Image: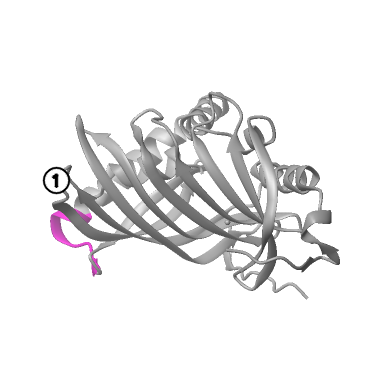
């Protein structure tokens, strides 16, 4: 029951309600939307080059519906997200709250062993191609938000206890197929939440879908806390509605000796 759609949805969608007021000592309309967005995107993208890595647990609840609205899939999976040869790998631990056992456990162990063998044989160039291909499949780079969208500050809101400004982004390029809303921390210049509406068909994704992701930052690295996707996509040539909820927890950081140690988000003073 290891659903390949899980990877598809997360990769395809790389990867904010508000009231007027004072933000970081400035009124909302005094904040420079372009500068704040640029700095937040720069901080997010720069983190990709960091050598800091985190493992974590990810609980995913997936439901599929056919064109008539009948539910065809409903199950949950718990993954241990780790790294093999510096490439992220999700190891299945539980299905519907029950630990793997018997044949399912053997199959998952074989999948893991195969991944270790295959990825360990890759050279640096091959790993870079895989990572580049994943970025292309994401449908958009965050830096595209600076060139392919018109942005406007529309207010403020609180996300995970953080006082944020809300930036609305509408497409100005024919290549842009989504409408975005970003909650940005004006003090730390961090993206705290990202929402999207699917305005037009994009690959297998069909217009009409929605999604949201919430982030925390540990040592300057953005980590997804939770996500919800409600999208329409073609699966095996059939149009399906896919509803997927993701909860991430127990973030652990690799130290320089590759030991995994607990890591907690530091509360902002």
Towards the viewer: 76 or 49 = 76
> Which quarter of the rendering shows the C terminus?
bottom right
Towards the viewer: 206 or 134 = 206
Residue plotted at (33% across, 31% down): 204
Identify the coloring.
Answer: one colour
Q: Which residues are magenta?
A: 98-105
Q: Is residue 50 visible?
A: no
Residue plotted at (70% across, 74% down): 267
Residue plotted at (62% across, 64% down): 18
Q: Was residue 104 drawn as part of the magenta stretch in this picture? A: yes
Give the vertical position of 87 relative to 173 (above or below): below
x and y, in percent, of residue 36 in the image: 77, 49
Q: Which residue is mark 1?
A: 68
Query: Is 12 placed left or right of 4 in the picture?
Result: right
x and y, in percent, of residue 30 in the image: 84, 55
Query: Is 29 placed left or right of 181 in the picture?
Result: right
């Amino acid at each position: 029951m290891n659903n390949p759609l899980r990877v598809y949805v997360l990769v395809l969608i790389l990867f904010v309600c508000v009231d007027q007021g004072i933000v970081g000592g400035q009124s909302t309309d005094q904040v420079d939307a372009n500068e704040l967005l640029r700095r937040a995107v720069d901080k997010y993208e720069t983190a990709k080059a960091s050598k800091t890595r985190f493992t974590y647990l990810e609980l995913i609840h997936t439901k599929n519906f056919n064109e008539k609205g009948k539910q065809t899939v409903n199950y949950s999976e718990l993954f241990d997200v780790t790294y093999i040869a510096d490439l992220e790998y999700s190891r299945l631990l539980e299905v519907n709250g029950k630990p793997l056992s018997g044949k399912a456990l053997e199959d998952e162990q074989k999948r893991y062993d195969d991944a270790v063998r295959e990825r360990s044989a890759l050279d640096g160039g091959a790993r870079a191609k895989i990572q580049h291909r994943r970025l292309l499949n994401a449908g958009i780079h965050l830096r595209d938000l600076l060139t392919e969208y018109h942005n406007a500050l529309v207010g403020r809101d609180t996300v995970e206890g953080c006082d944020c400004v809300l930036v609305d982004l509408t497409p100005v390029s024919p290549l842009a197929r989504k409408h975005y809303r970003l909650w940005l921390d004006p003090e730390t210049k961090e993206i705290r939440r990202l929402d999207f509406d699917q305005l037009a068909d994009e690959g297998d994704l069909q217009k009409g879908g929605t999604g949201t992701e919430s982030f925390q930052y540990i040592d300057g690295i953005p980590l997804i806390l939770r996500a919800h996707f409600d999208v329409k996509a073609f699966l095996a040539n059939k149009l399906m509605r896919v509803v997927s909820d993701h909860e991430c927890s127990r973030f652990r950081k690799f130290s320089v000796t590759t030991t995994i140690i607990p890591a907690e988000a530091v509360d902002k003073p």
